[in-house]
Image (cartoon, rainbow, N blue to C red):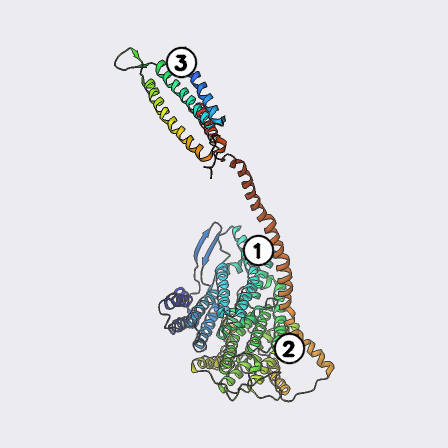
Amino acid sequence: MSLNSVLLLGAILFAIGLYGVMVKRNVITILMCLELMFSGVILSAVAFSRYIPIELSSESNTSFILDGQIFALFIMAVVAAETTVGVALIICVYRESKTLFSSDISNLQN
Amino acid sequence: MNTELIIWSIFGLPLASFIIISLGIRGFVPNRPLLAPICSIGTSVLSFILSLYILVQYSSIDTNISSHSIINMSGLTLSFGILLNPLTVVMLVVVTVVSILVQFYSVGYMRKDPSFIRYFAYLSLFTACMLGIVISSNLIQLFIFWELVGLCSYLLIGFWHYKPSASYAAKKAFIVTRIGDIGFLIAILVVVSVQTNLENSNNILDLPNLITAISNGVFSSNQITIISLGLLAGAIGKSAQFPLHVWLPDAMEGPTPVSALIHAATMVAAGVFLIARFFPGIHSSIPDIMFLIACIGSFTALISALMALVMNDIKRILAYSTISQLGFMFAAVGFGAWGAAIFHLVTHAFFKALLFLLSGNISHGIPTHSFDLRNMGQLRTKMPFTFIAMLCGACSLAGIFPFSGFWSKDEILAEALSNQQYLIFGVLLITTFITSIYIFRIIHLAFLNPKKQMKGQQVPEKAHEANWIMNIPILLLSIAAIGIGVIINSPIDLGLINAHMFSSFIGAHVHDLNIQLMIISTIIGISGFIITFWYYNYPISIPSVLKNYLLKINNVITNKYYIDIIYEKYFMMKFIYSFLANFLHKIDEKLIDNTVNQIGATVKNSSHIIKQIQNGQMQVYAGFTSIGVLIFFVMFIIFIR
């Protein structure tokens, strides 16, 4: 499994998420698609850190930096928090306008 | 002493007075209005003394004064300079003298006016600008001062601007003279266009160079024609000659001393001065235009004298009389007798200023404060001083020996004869006769006690003489009206006074003594008095057929030959307002407004398309954001890597 195929998978995940964000009407679904986009990004980050070796200056052998994988954990935590806030907002909006369709929630325009 | 400095200070002193009065006195000590006339008369007196010095020392001073270039453009230099010749010197003296006397008179006449200080500021500015015209050596410099005196005239006619008639008259004067000034401007532009193509460095905008260039054939004959016609148009506008004479009678709405200074003695004579400045040098190349000038002058002299015959307002009579006398001067310049024209200009400046000031005296003295002849009458015993001064002015205007008007008018007539201009001579002789009638009509109706009175005439019960401030200038002007003609230009040697002093000083043609003509013109002048005396004291019955005929003529003349009506109703209303303004309005509305509106509408319509994006749908925003990021990404790949 090469880096390219993993990155392609990440890009597909991101694209599917983006498509969903742009097209789906239900706000919950949009939130879920957002999760998909995040997954794509996290997958890319992990893949980079897994596949790209970095030469350390002091020694001749190559090693891997785990920055990307640690970063993935942080992103997951933040996304979990973000989802909580997002769902809370959606509930608020639902209480206000009795709808979950994104096309009906446009009264911030004015 | 430095001649150039003297002449610039002759011009600069009244200008400084204007600045001091308008900025200093009006701003800081407005409660001491008498400072204004002290300042303006003081500077005028200084200017007068300096002018007199130049006049006396003229033969010994260096008249060649170089000009200073103000603006340098490629091929065109605007320079300010002094053209000093006898004509300049004579005009300097005349303008300063009349200005001093009129300002002095104004102190008495305008004493109770709330805008006393402003009045003297304007008078100072006018004096400065008029002196500026006189000394100008450059066409553009001349034009600047020419327009500035027009502005002063406008300001002073509209001095009582709260009177609708005054502001209307001011506008009329300004616009009508401006029509002539367009001609002046065209003449200047022609000279400028030739100047920019000229090889040598001679600045032909300077007047002496211009006249040399014209006689050297630098200009084509068409250009000379345009230049001289343009200058003529400017002169006609300023000097109120036919067909632009309509503004001067209305200009009498201004204060009377202003009428005396600007609309009788100095500014209106600027047209004659302009022609006398230019045309002697280029006379031979444009005989047709000279003849045109003579025709316009004599025609104007005749028609305006006739109008003066039927008017009831004393100032209007004098205004028409001024137009008529300026017509005399034009006619004289037209047949080459510019020396006689300037001589008449000088004497006319004095006696006409006198007559105007006297009309102010009368209006000041009678209870109605009106200028209408119907409110005057039998003033001889009540205002004896005014009456005697008026007689001097009237005799001078009518050309009765030996008053000053006689000498100058006689010189014009003699020149007409010696130039074989018999038609013009005849017209001018008839005009002399009419002049005499209308001026003695004023004397009879206002001062004497004729048996026949005007319709609706109400003789004032009491009247008083003016105070000494007003009478001193009148006394001096009366002396000038009696004596100045014979003193400055006597036709024969009088021991102390050389013959033809004036003519030979300004370098004009000196004509021989023509005794028969002198006798004839004096008889004509006196016959005007006799006819009016007879008409008003021994009323005759005119046959009714003749009377109807005369009434019709009277009607035409009283309506000013319908010229004003034609100008206002047909030219202004029909042509300018209905046709031209309408046409321009259409262009404005349809073309310009529409273009702008279409641009606005296009923007508005195209904004509808963009507006769709801002619909509050966050998914659409997200889509555009993604597309934007994508575009940046693609650009990054293409251009950066």
Check residue A3 in the rendering and tell me which mark sits there, or answer none. Answer: 3
Is residue A7 among what the camera can see? yes
Q: Is label 3 on the same chain as label 2?
A: no
Q: Which element type, helix, strand or loop, lies under badge 1?
A: loop
Circle 1 crowding by C-alpha within 10 Å: few under 14, some 14–19, many from 20: some
Q: Position of residue A1 (x, y in %)?
A: 41, 10
For disc 3, the chain is A
Q: CA distance from mark 2 to mark 1?
A: 39 Å
Which secondary structure lies at badge 2?
helix
Tell me if mark 2 has few (under 14), some (14-19) or many (20+) residues whose alpha carbon lies within 10 angstroms of its own: some
Looking at numbered disc 2 in the image, what kind of residue is underneath it? Ile
What is the three-letter code of the residue carrying label 3? Leu
Q: Which disc is residue B247 wearing?
A: none
Residue type, label 1 = Phe
Residue contact at pointers 1 and 3, CB within 8 angstroms: no
Mark nearer the viewer, 2 or 1: 2
Q: Nearer the viewer, mark 3 or mark 2?
A: 3
Above or below B514: residue A39: above
